[in-house]
Image: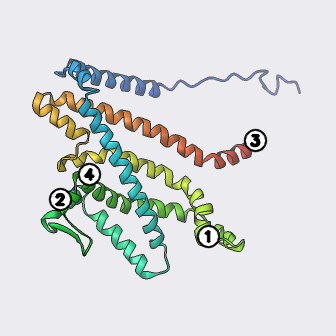
Amino acid sequence: MSKNDLNTPDEYVFVRKIHYDRYLAVALIILLLGLIVRAFVVGKIAWAVVGEYLFDRDIMAGIVNSMILTVFVMVVGVMLAVTVALMAGSKNPVLRYTARGYMFVFRSVPILLQLLIWYNLALIFPQITIPFVVSVSTTQVLTPFVAALLAFGIAQGAYTTEVIRSGLLSVGRGQVEAAASIGMTYSQSLYRIIIPQAMRVIVPPLGNETIGMVKYTSLASVIQYREIIYSAQSIYFASGRVIEMLMVCAFWYALVIGILSIVQGYIERYYNRSSRGSAAGEADL
């Protein structure tokens, strides 16, 4: 039987499929973006004013204050979250139910409401008194920054607790038992074995919460904390350039969040480096 009788081609011809739906989707997206850009270009926005106030001293002070508040809030929130997550996993029922109660209360009450309560706490407690030590006016202690730090920090701790707890649960029980078998205490195994492995699970949602907190700090403008929205409002109340100042705020928020997203990506790759290496090894085999 000859080769031709088997109808076997000498060469195989590969025909590349043309995905017309993809090209159509790209064209529609470009068209939509073009219409949006055109709307802002021809709209009644004085872009020269936007450029003029982009690096205004008050605006720059506002974005710095927003970042300072975000950093302190996340530090307080993470410290609370780690403590409460360990309490939630405790065998002691008092600690366990206390942790659950804390999470329920501070996740149930809106953050804006918590902010207003802390700021107006002086209406209930005019004085903060430590017997035989000090007695000061509550308004002197609960400044807009402190009120915002307490409101955001405590609420953030309640949300971040679940992130920390899920990260700790992602590490197998055998890791703790192996650490105990070589004489490690629970605290040593926690900081040397459990938490480093849990960071792969913790970092992505924690990074998202940090990015979200940058935006949540804008709520502090209602208690006169001088963040970027409050600074922009002070300017446009005097100049009448409302939308221009809002565009300035949008630019800075986009820039800051873009930078934080890049940093988050580097941190995630750092903690995932071992899993990437193992995956690459398996692929080579």
Nearer to us: label 1 or label 4: 4
Give whichever of 283, 276 is nearer the camera.
276
Q: Earlier in the sequence, mark 3 or mark 2?
A: 2
* Relative side of 99 to 195, left or right: left
Q: Amino acid at mark 4?
A: Phe
Indicate the secondary structure of the residue bearing disc 2: helix
Q: CA distance from mark 4 to mark 3?
A: 54 Å
Outermost residue toward the front? 132
Nearer to us: label 3 or label 1: 1
Q: Which residue is tagged 2?
A: 139
Q: Amino acid at mark 2?
A: Thr
Residue 16 locus on image (x, y percent): 60, 24
Indicate the secondary structure of the residue bearing disc 4: helix
Label 3 neighbour load within 10 Å: few <14, some 14-19, many 20+ = few
Indicate the secondary structure of the residue bearing disc 3: helix
Task: Tell whether label 3 touches label 4 (CB within 8 Å).
Answer: no
Q: Which residue is tagged 1?
A: 173
Q: Earlier in the sequence, mark 4 or mark 2?
A: 2
Q: Earlier in the sequence, mark 4 or mark 3?
A: 4
